[in-house]
Image (cartoon, rainbow, N blue to C red):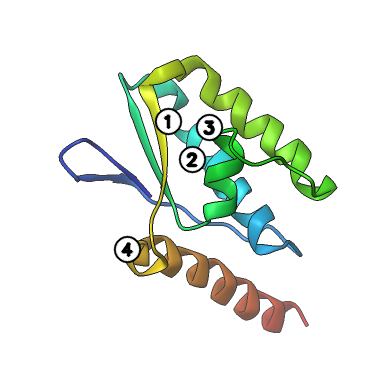
């Protein structure tokens, strides 16, 4: 979900990414969101994630030990680099991230329905 500084929703999106861990899905959502705003060239960027692991890894406080996350981490950091110190990544409780949770469920529900139609 992408909002402006006044909390107006600018864009929401979701997609099925296949078999992935929660952390891989969190990284992919971050990457997709950063790609989606690239053309808007915002002055600053506040990113809220309900994965403390991803926040701490991207902020450089924790190492990325899991091989399946290293490339995703590299991509996310690369997409954040142009913002320099104008970006903040913060951890929020899952209860404060209900819209994102709803979008995940939409992607999964659509995949299940599609799978039944294809099967």
Residue at mark 2 to residue at mark 1: CA–CA distance: 6 Å
Residue highlighted by disc 2: 33
Element under disc 3: helix
In the displayed structure, 46 sits above or below 1; it is above
| Residue visible at 44% across and 67% down in the picture | 101
In the displayed structure, 57 sits above or below 22; it is above
Residue at mark 1 to residue at mark 4: CA–CA distance: 22 Å
Report the quarter where the C terminus lies.
bottom right
Residue highlighted by disc 4: 96
Mark 3 neighbour class, 10 Å CA radius: few under 14, some 14 to 19, many 20 or more: few
How many labels, in total?
4
Q: Are marks 4 and 2 in contact (CB under 8 Å)?
A: no
Q: Earlier in the sequence, mark 4 or mark 3?
A: 3
Q: Are marks 1 and 3 in contact (CB under 8 Å)?
A: yes
Report the disc number at residue 55. Answer: none
Looking at the image, residue 114 sits to the left or right of residue 94; the answer is right
Element under disc 4: helix
| Residue visible at 46% across and 24% down in the picture | 38
Residue highlighted by disc 1: 37
Q: Are marks 3 and 2 in contact (CB under 8 Å)?
A: yes
Residue 86: x %, y % from top left: 37, 21
């Amino acid at each position: 979900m992408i909002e402006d500084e006044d909390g107006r929703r600018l864009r929401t999106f979701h997609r099925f990414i296949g078999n992935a861990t929660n952390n891989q899905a969190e990284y992919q959502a971050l990457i997709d969101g950063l790609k989606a705003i690239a053309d808007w060239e915002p002055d600053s960027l506040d990113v809220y994630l309900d994965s403390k692991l991803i926040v701490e890894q991207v902020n450089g406080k924790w190492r990325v030990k899991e091989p399946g996350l290293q490339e995703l981490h590299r991509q996310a950091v690369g997409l954040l680099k142009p913002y320099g110190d104008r970006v903040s990544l913060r951890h929020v409780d899952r209860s404060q991230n209900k819209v994102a949770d709803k979008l995940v469920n939409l992607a999964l529900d659509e995949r299940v329905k599609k799978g039944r139609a294809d099967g």
